[in-house]
Amino acid sequence: MIDVQPIIDQLTALVPGAELSPCPSADADATPALWVSAAHIVPVCLALRDTPGLEFVAFSNVTAADFHPKRAPRFDVVYHIVSPHRRTRLRLKVQLGLDEPIASVTSVWAGAGWCEREVYDLFGIVFEGHADLRRLMMTEDWVGHPLRKDYPVQVRKDAQTYMPLQITAEEFRANMERDRYSRTRPK
Amino acid sequence: MAEVRTETMTVNMGPQHPSTHGVLRLVLELDGETVVSVSPTIGFLHTGIEKTAEQKKWQQVIPLVERMDYLGAQSNSLAYCLSVEKLLGMEVPQRVKDIRVLIAELQRISSHLVWFGTHGMEIGAITVMLYAFREREILMNLNEMMAGFRFFPSYIRVGGLRDDLPRGFKEAVTAFIDRLPGKLDEYETMLTKNPIWLDRTRGVGTITLADCYQYGLFGPIARAAGGDYDVRRAFPYSGYETYKFDVIGASNGDVYDRYITRVAEMRESVKIIRQALDRIEPVGEWQVADRKVAPPPKDEVYTEMEALIQHFLIYSQGFNVPAGEAYVPVEGPRGEHGCYVVSDGTNRPWRVHMRSPGLMASQALHKFIVGGMIADVVAVIGSLDVVMGDVDR
């Protein structure tokens, strides 16, 4: 079991005002976790990277989790970082509500760029100060954020055409339905 | 002589380009033959596996995550199972750990052989592709023997393995690892000192170790740039701390060093497989004794009421995992594979996220190719060994 309290003490001294608290998790023997207040994520990350004795120089991952009906600030943004030569890992967690932005950590670890784009794409969390915050996985004209818990698992959308139809929209839809039906009907 | 400045030209490469290992689209800006900028587009293979996984029971997620990084399928499922077992607070038997190590290393060789063959072929050495796929076919047959499925065996399960190793498996693996080192020598005579290969790969696509860590590149890419970070050493899982092997590295961080690193890694894998084979008893446990997670054996299901009920419960409702979160990294063929799993205490995962080494590699592509020649782009992508299923998920 790795104790995060020394790290918290060190960080509290370096980043005044940051609210940090340990976060118990099942994998605390290898990856201790701590809660970080959203406003202080960039200074905390900078301190973690540059302070001798911490040296989390390597970036591993940014992701998120949505706890929509269960919890009031619904999102957790989760950062995994590594110190390759000291062989330590750390998880930072930030709670965010709907439509609350968070500062981007791309200035600390360049590798966060696409991970933050992915979180923006799939959860709709906006990272302020990100140089190129576009959708990554979905197409640019996609509506909605698929990994949110209130996004339906199956959506039936009408077929899109990029040329004007030669038949009415109803006829077109009926043709599509007929085709779908004949293909899925059990023999 | 005054420097001649010309207009830059924009070239679209992919998404269907044969050397992009699937569907990676690059928009390259060229000044003559020199790459000025690159803008990669991904997502063509996005299938929403993470969303689908939230609808499945814990054990049903394994076939899904195996389809992410389809060349290193079993390193995905190993990362996932280790994370879920961490949440369950479960310790699997020693024999299961040894079999998992054996499988993980076979998977690494299999993935590296595909990389070796396609990387060589893309730079123009078509012969090695035919050779490497011959050896890989044996590994596919081993998968088939073990699980009845060649590509995505889904053999590693939460709580152990799907079944015991089949009879004759040990002999088949021994025959393969007796054969492989000689074949690797054969491959290396074709490339390692081949002047054309050296010209195409040495000093091409160079990256520094600091950049690797900034961009989240671990595994063979960082080790070829002088790093020594290997998850098997730094954060051992499945008993890797008890195996003797070297962490292979090089120092220049170019395409050639990545080639050297991966080929040497295959030899190290052979060493680990030999040790694992010596430890695996012919008969023994292949899953945990906890009947809440592991289904009871068939002979009990057919003879005992309790076992029958347990069987139905496991296959209809699955098992509950205590609420919490876990992230366990493993050293996959491409670097640090890890699975971040969140549970809300029910029989379905709340969130499954796979850390994908390929995503990081394709993000950092500009570090490797800007300033180089357009012909080297193919060499660099090959040496990064990106798998688009893993990138897009």
Image (tube, coloured by chain):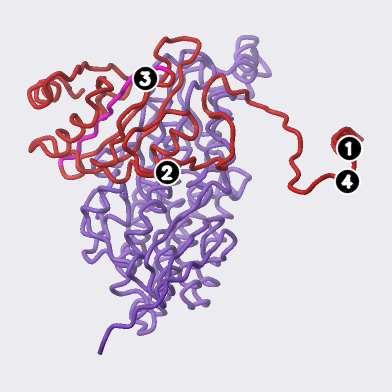
Chain colours: A red, B purple
Residue A36, picture quadrant: top left
Task: Give the amino acid type for the residue marked by disc 2 in the picture.
Answer: Ser
The residue that disc 2 covers is: B356
Quarter holding residue A77: top left
- Given residues B151 and B306, the one toward you in this image is B151
**Residue B257 is covered by the magenta coloring:** no
Q: Secondary structure at mark 1?
A: loop
Numbered badge on residue B248: none
Q: Earlier in the sequence, mark 4 or mark 3?
A: 3
Q: Are marks 4 and 3 in contact (CB under 8 Å)?
A: no
Quadrant hosting residue B271: bottom left
For the residue labelled by badge 2, is the local secondary structure a helix, a strand or a loop? Answer: loop
Chain for disc number 3: A
How many angstroms separate mark 1 from mark 2 (CA)? Answer: 45 Å
| Mark positioned earlier in the residue sequence (3 or 1) | 3
Q: Which residues are magenta?
A: A86-97
Residue beneath disc 4: A166
